Image (tube, rainbow, N blue to C red):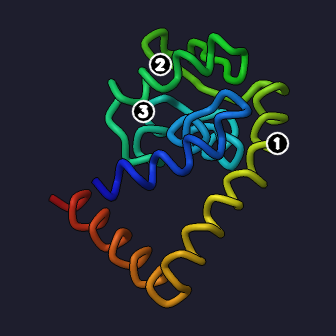
Amino acid sequence: MATRAVTQLYDDTLKPLGLRGTQFTVLAALMQTGLIKLTDLTNVLSMDRTTLTRNLKPLEEQGLIEITVGEDRRERLVSLTPQGRAVVEEALPLWEQAQTKMVQGLGAEAASTLLALLANSTQIVQGA
């Protein structure tokens, strides 16, 4: 229930740009990585390939990302388009507003503890 509520906050905040929180996360990761293999992006985002592919499809249809074939024909490369970069730059202040709302609601110490617990949880799951 808490996960859905937090997701809804970010989705509602990014809605004016036609983005969901998960889509923003993908775009922000691509902004940092640049051109990246699809398999490497799954690792960066700790997301399985099927879920990532499902998130990439609408972004590609909107012209925010480009998926090309790598040297190995089986390999897919993902990158932001100029339009995608512009959307990330426009979305970042909105994401920061949602983040500020969460921190203010929880309090700085609780927010810091929560982030540490989530990071530890991710490490445990990835190590399993």
Give the mark count.
3
Most distant residue in the bottom direction = 109
Question: Looking at the rendering, which quadrant does residue 52 occupy?
Answer: top left
Q: Which residue is mark 3?
A: 39
Residue at label 2? 75
Q: Nearer the viewer, residue 54 or 97?
A: 97
The amino acid sitting under disc 1 is Glu
Q: Residue at x 60, y 45 (%)?
A: 29
Nearest to the eye among marks 3 and 1: give it.
Answer: 1
Number of residues whose C-alpha sits closer than 10 Å to that of mark 1, classed few (under 14), some (14–19) or many (20 or more) = few
Cα separation between marks 3 and 1: 27 Å
- Label 2: few (<14), some or many (≥20) within 10 Å? few
Task: Tell me which amino acid carries mark 2.
Answer: Glu
- Above or below, 13 against 85 in this view is below
Q: Amino acid at mark 3?
A: Thr
Estimate the x, y position of residue 112 in percent, counting from the top left: 48, 83
The answer to whether marks 3 and 1 mark residues whose Cβ atoms lie closer than 8 Å is no
Secondary structure beneath dot 3 equals: helix
Question: Closer to the camera: disc 1 or disc 2?
Answer: 1
Query: Who comes first in sequence, dot 3 or dot 1?
Result: 3
**How far apart are the alpha carbons under marks 1 and 2?**
31 Å
Please state the horizontal and vertical placement of residue 85, each as a whole percent of the image: 80, 35
Q: Quadrant of residue 58?
A: top right
Q: Is residue 36 rendered to the left or right of residue 2?
A: right
Q: Residue at x 59, y 42 (%)?
A: 12
User: Going 66% across and 41% down the picture, which residue do you hit?
Assistant: 14
In the image, which is nearer the foreground, mark 2 or mark 3? 3
- Residue 79 rendering spot, x and y as whole percentages: 67, 28
- How far across and how far down the image is residue 91, in percent? 75, 44
What residue is pinned by disc 1?
90
Report if the CB atoms under discs 2 and 3 are less than 8 Å apart. yes
Whether 125 is drawn above or below 104: the answer is above
